[in-house]
Image: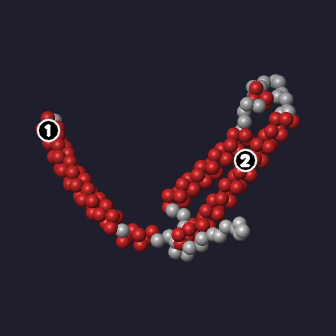
Amino acid sequence: MDSTVKRDTSSEAVPSAKFLQARITALSTTLIKRLENIFAVALDETGPQSMFPAGGSDVPPPPSLTDTSVQQFQLDVESTAVIRAAEEIMMLTRTLKEIWLFGGLDTLEQDHHNEEDEAMRKKMDEDIKVVEDGFKRFLERYETAIEVDTTKKTVAA
């Protein structure tokens, strides 16, 4: 029995655009969240030092060993997670480069030869012309309304 898994290296193994976009979004969200967590731990104002006013004569006690070790552990965990997220982003960019270089990314050919896209473009061009005509009619009405208002003001003055 052979328990090894063979990987398919053909172009069918190329991830879809939807998957790649979801992966990019997930990784960037993870990276941002981990950085926010680091700042939250570093700027934690709920500790014993924040209970004393800044101008008070009482000197706040130093943080306890437990508080310091908990913060250090949280910072270690979050910094490791930031490094891991950055490494995964690097792996994803490497994958995108490989797909682009070795021909798995045929976005230009698909755009030019897809009949549905051509139909959508024609429909969009028609819609653009309708909107453009509507704006022209609106501007013509608006410009005549302004000219009439300015002439009334000059006559009244």
**Depth-wise, is mark 1 or mark 2 nearer the camera?**
2
Q: Residue at x 68, y 43 (%)?
A: 37
Q: As displayed, is residue 135 above or below residue 87?
A: above
Above/below status of 112 relative to 46: below
Q: Locate residue 43 relative to residue 104 in the image: left or right.
A: right
Q: Quadrant of residue 51?
A: top right
Most extreme residue toward the left is: 155
Asked which secondary structure carries label 2, the reply is helix
Quarter holding the C terminus is top left
For mark 2, does the 10 Å Cα neighbourhood hold few (<14), some (14 to 19), or many (20 or more) residues?
many
Q: Is residue 66 left or right of residue 143?
A: right
Sequence-first tag of 1 and 2: 2
The image quarter in which residue 94 lies? bottom right
Total marks drawn?
2
Q: Residue 41 placed where, x, y %?
A: 73, 40
Q: Which mark is residue 124?
A: none
Q: Disc 2 designates what residue? A: 78
Q: Is residue 108 left or right of residue 140?
A: right
Where does label 1 land, which residue? 152
Q: Residues within 10 Å of mark 1 (few under 14, many from 20)?
A: few
Question: Residue 125 appears in which quarter of the rendering?
Answer: bottom left
**Which residue is at a point 76% across and 43% down the rendered structure image?**
74
Q: Answer above or below: position of 153 versus 86.
A: above
Query: Measured from the top left, where is residue 33 in percent x and y?
Result: 64, 46
Which amino acid is tagged 1?
Lys
The answer to whether residue 154 is visible is no
Foreground pick, 111 / 69: 111
